[in-house]
Image: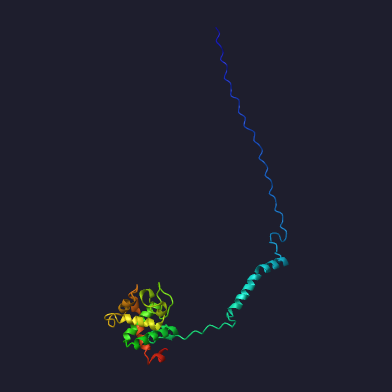
Amino acid sequence: MTSARTAPPRRPAPQRSPAKRPAPKRAAPKRAAPKRAGAGRPAAKRPPGRRGGAAALRTWWPAYVLAVVVVFALSWRADGSEAAEPPPTTALCTVPATSVTLAADQWANARTIADVARQRGLPERAIVIALATAMQESTLHNLDYGDRDSLGLFQQRPSQGWGTPQQVQDPVYAAGQFYDRLVRVPGWDTMRLTDAAQIVQRSGFPEAYQRWDGFAQSLTVALRSDDRERNCG
């Protein structure tokens, strides 16, 4: 028997490399067109015409008229007479031996407090306590306002039995009420000033009156009848 011949092995077909595509051509950059003279500048604004000015006048003329009326009204009183000039500022007074300066109303109120004590025959210690108290409560101004219903030089409260609102704003009455209650305090003339004042006033700041002790003593001396005109009044 003849043996079958074995077929020779086939060689693999050679692989073809893919064909290369040509690279796309780049477009040449475009050159910017030359700018024209004046290009890029904002256009000049034209002045408003007659119509714009007339509209603005119609909008604002009521305000102009109102301003003129207000100025005219302020320069005349209701009775048609010309308004008076404000009073000139009164001269100030520096209390001797202190750096405190008082205005005319403060000096007048301090003098009233001292006079009421002297008319009652009270010693100068009472004046010192009263002046220190009034300085702390109102800085010697006869106030028409205060905490709750407190009024006047000593910030006395009508609701607490000190008098009517009109009475406690009368410096003579207010000083008298203070002295009436002060002299009822046992040992008032020997205790610390702030302790005596606190018993009368019943303040929420019981130590506040003591700071005015030295000032009140100097003011009391300045308010003596033989020195008041020469020193300050």
Q: Quadrant of residue 13?
A: top right
Question: Residue placed at 36% from the left, 86% from the top?
Answer: 116
Residue 70: image location, x then y, percent:
60, 75
Q: Is residue 173 above or below residue 48?
A: below
Residue 2: image location, x then y, percent:
56, 8
Taking the image as shown, residue 75 lies to the left or right of residue 133, namely right
Image quadrant where one finds the N terminus: top right
Residue 44: image location, x then y, percent:
70, 64
Residue pushed farthest top?
A: 1
Q: Quadrant of residue 18?
A: top right
Camera-side residue: 12 or 36? Answer: 36
Camera-side residue: 210 or 187? Answer: 187
Q: Is residue 81 above or below residue 9?
A: below
Image quadrant where one finds the C terminus: bottom left
Q: Kindly tell me whether residue 200 is visible in this rendering.
A: yes
Residue 67: image location, x then y, percent:
61, 74
Taking the image as shown, residue 230 lies to the left or right of residue 50, namely left
Q: Is residue 119 above or below residue 185?
A: below
Q: Kindly tell me whether residue 49 is visible in this rendering.
A: no
Q: Quadrant of residue 197?
A: bottom left
